[in-house]
Image: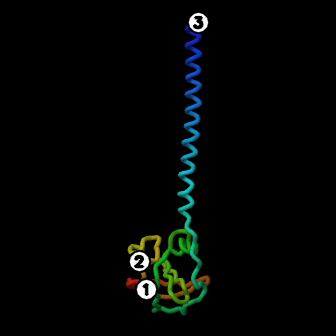
Amino acid sequence: MTNESKRLIAIGAIVFVLAIGAGTGLARWRASRQQQSQPVAEAAAPTPLPLPQFGSLLTASDNGEVQGKALCGYCSWEVGAPEHNVVLKTDAAPGLVFLSPNEQLTEIEKLTGKCADGTIEIRARGAVTQYAGRNYLLVRNFETVPSR
């Protein structure tokens, strides 16, 4: 065997070992990346709370008043439109009152954020209506209430 043959064999062996090492490193990197992305996806899906006293209807009124904690109806109970929607969770029946979109709801969302988490209690006044077994309030004015 000549020196040139020995060199070619040595270079071939080195390239072979480097290729195996690179393949193993790539496989480990892909596996660690898949493990990192899975817990984030599982943590992002909160378990909905049980729907409180759903189905009790308020009397329709142009001058109704509702007080409750502002929550996101979709994130909390998967009720309403798939985008975030603010509902008031009352202590007594009916349990939930959906707030109809208008300028006042925009002002409430500035306080609570789009996905309200129940930390802010609101007393809202306006027109109360029902649709499909749900209560809706078109807010004319509102105020925050100190938490009890």
Query: Is residue 125 or residue 28 the one in the foreground?
Result: 28
Q: Helix, strand, or loop for circle 1?
A: strand
Q: What residue type is labelled 1?
A: Ala
Residue 44: % across, % down: 53, 62
Residue 99: % across, % down: 49, 80
Residue tagged 2: 108
Please state which of the two labelled residues, at mark 2 or mark 3, is closer to the viewer. 3
Q: Earlier in the sequence, mark 2 or mark 3?
A: 3
Residue tagged 3: 2
* Quarter-of-image position of residue 104: bottom left
Residue tagged 1: 124
In the depicted structure, whether residue 19 falls above or below residue 92: above
Marks 3 and 1 close (CB-CB < 8 Å): no
In the depicted structure, whether residue 43 falls above or below residue 54: above
Other-residue count near label 3 (Cα within 10 Å), few / some / many at <14 / 14–19 / ≥20: few
Q: Which of marks 3 and 1 is nearer the N terminus?
A: 3
Q: Helix, strand, or loop for circle 2?
A: helix
Marks 1 and 2 close (CB-CB < 8 Å): yes
Residue 142: % across, % down: 40, 84
**From the image, which quarter does the C terminus lie in?**
bottom left
Residue at coordinates 43% horizontally, 86% vertically from top-left?
124
User: Is 101 left or right of 42, judged from the image as shown?
Assistant: left
Q: What residue type is labelled 3?
A: Thr
Other-residue count near label 1 (Cα within 10 Å), few / some / many at <14 / 14–19 / ≥20: many
